[in-house]
Amino acid sequence: MTKKPMYPTLLPAHVRHDKNLTALSKILYSELYAEFNHVTEDYIIIIYSKYENLYEKSAKTIIRAFKCLERNNYIKIIDIDYLNIDKKRIYLIK
């Protein structure tokens, strides 16, 4: 059993009430929002497999949820390692 994080997350109202986002996208946004409170840069590095394991979802489902956030201009996803397609740089837009 993997250790689950024990920090609180926030889900801003503009995200919570956005009908274009899936429930998983909203949860992932709250995770990202919490992580941004612990960095000094304007981006964070994520690994999709972390979220696959944390939420027990397939890689396709996690990627689709992140793409939904990007398509609705909540985040910007940048590939940082073409050999490791699982690793991404994420910028929070709103």
Image (cartoon, grey):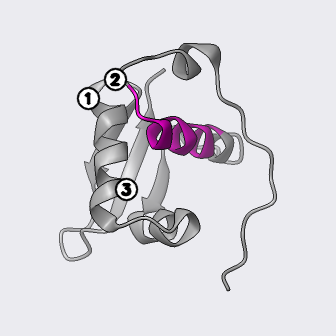
Sequence-wise first label, 2 or 3: 3
Disc 1 to disc 3, C-alpha distance: 14 Å
Q: Is residue 21 left or right of residue 41?
A: left
Q: Which residue is mark 3?
A: 62
In the rendered structure, which amino acid carries the disc numbered 2?
A: Asn
Kind of element beneath mark 2: loop
Q: Is residue 62 left or right of residue 40?
A: left
User: Where on the picture, by quarter, is residue 54?
Assistant: bottom right
Taking the view exactly as shown, the residue that stands out farthest to the left is 82
Q: Which residues are magenta?
A: 21-33
- CB atoms of marks 2 and 1 within 8 Å: yes
Q: Which residue is mark 1?
A: 71
Give the residue drawn at x 32%, y 23%.
72
Kind of element beneath mark 1: helix
Disc 2 to disc 1, C-alpha distance: 6 Å
In the rendered structure, which amino acid carries the disc numbered 1?
A: Arg
Residue 94 is labelled as none
Q: Which residue is mark 2?
A: 73
